[in-house]
Amino acid sequence: MRTRTAIVSLLIGLLLVSGFALAAEPVHITVATGAVGQELEISREAAARYMELNPDVKITVLDTPDMVQDRLGLYLQFFEAQSPEVDVYQIDVIWPGDLAEHFLDLYEYGGKEVAELHFPEIVDNNTVDGKLVAIPWFTDAGLLYYRTDLLKEYGLEPPTTWDELEAAAANVQAGERAKGNQDFWGYVWQGNAYEGLTCDALEWLASNDGGSIIEFDGTISVNNPRAVEILEQAAGWVGTISPPGVIGFAEEDARTMFQAGNALFMRNWPYCYSLGNGPDSAIAGKFDVSPLPAGASGAGAATLGGWQLSVSKYSKHPEVAADVALFLASYEEQKIRAIQASMNPTIMSLYQDSDVLEASPFMGSLYDVFVNAVARPSTISAPRYNEVSTLFFNAVHSVLTGKSAASDALEELELDLQDLTGLPVK
């Protein structure tokens, strides 16, 4: 009897220990994020802060491809498999309409209490059929970076038109090469065939009264004389004021060249600002930012960018995953990102925060650029935007590489967009 009692006691003890071990097992949450600039590092630091406050949660920050199309392809594999492997996804501002079916409604997980803090336009963008499928994380708009020291040396002002940019770029490029820097170029930007080129080229078109590819009224507008004109002008930059290899550049390629001191002008996103002033930068304290130049419209245009956080409907821990997403997008965390990495907040009140403005003054001086940025036609073309963009950037790339004349490329693009979307021509 004693032996039997001892065995029972031992079993009960083992069960209790086992139950305690199971209870102590942390909840695992995986966040898929980007790695452009400081994104990966700063996301991991934020995850560490959450885990310090919530020791029962273990967060893994997953590094995903820099190129938007590659990242979307990876996400689609997870969604097709209805995989619970990733709980929180960093998604582009252009994706909510296309991917909404895979995400939870954050209004049901605390999103209602914080949505009004963010720019209403971005919240509207992230709301599909009344459901908040993504919480805004940081916003973006294209900017012109320029070397203040070189413009001063050559007696030039920051350009306000594309013609002025061309002239200044050619002037300073010739001067710097004459001084011995044969690697110096006038202007670097994103010319590879990917979403980044869609952003650059949309800015060219909009600044030149060339439309927005597909207008908000649902008409295809891309095949017009102003669009042809500005694409021809941009193609003329390749190999003259921009390196021949610019047709293969993404954001980091342009940043690396500019930050090394080998370019006068650069088109890029706000994240480059803090990196350019970093301790390893050759141009720290020698550059500034301004709105992008204008064409025939008389005003520059900046493409709206930015990233959101969505919670997978296939997550095994939706409540915890949603809490992680809302924490990462909170006031405190957005402030840290703005100060340390020049990532523009989506919470409006942070644009009056003195610490943010001291670290990144352009967030105050160029506030209008961010709130008036040009949206890509992702809503009007959903759920086919990715295909629309691919057709567009491939057509533009063919012009930049000299494979097609601008008029021919846009005429063919117009027909392809009609076939794809069924939308009429403007």
Image: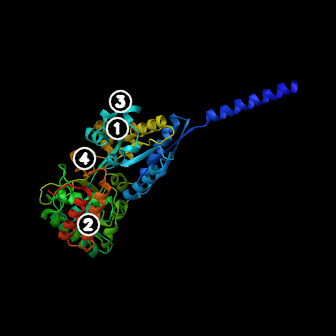
- Depth check: 169 or 307 in front? 307
Q: Does residue 352 sit above or below 369 in this rendering?
A: above
Q: Earlier in the sequence, mark 2 or mark 4?
A: 4
**Quadrant in which the C terminus appears:** bottom left
Q: Amino acid at mark 4?
A: Phe
Whether pointer 3 and pointer 4 mark residues with C-beta atoms closer than 8 Å, the reply is: no
Q: Which residue is denoted by mark 1 in the rendering?
A: 132
Q: Does residue 41 sit above or below 177 in this rendering?
A: above
Q: Which residue is denoted by mark 2 in the rendering?
A: 395
- Which quadrant of the figure has residue 367? top left
- Depth check: 116 or 310 in front? 310
Distance between the alpha carbons at the discs numbered 2 and 1: 34 Å
In the structure shown, which secondary structural element does the residue marked by tag 1 occupy? strand
In the structure shown, which secondary structural element does the residue marked by tag 3 occupy? helix
Distance between the alpha carbons at the discs numbered 3 and 1: 12 Å
Distance between the alpha carbons at the discs numbered 2 and 3: 44 Å
Whether pointer 2 and pointer 4 mark residues with C-beta atoms closer than 8 Å, the reply is: no
Q: Amino acid at mark 2?
A: Ala
Whether pointer 3 and pointer 1 mark residues with C-beta atoms closer than 8 Å, the reply is: no
Q: Nearer the viewer, mark 2 or mark 4?
A: 2
Distance between the alpha carbons at the discs numbered 2 and 4: 27 Å
Q: Residue at x 11, y 60 (%)?
A: 296
Q: Which residue is denoted by mark 3 in the rendering?
A: 113
Q: Which residue is denoted by mark 4 in the rendering?
A: 370
Q: Measuring from the top left, give residue 423's x and y in whole percent.
A: 20, 55
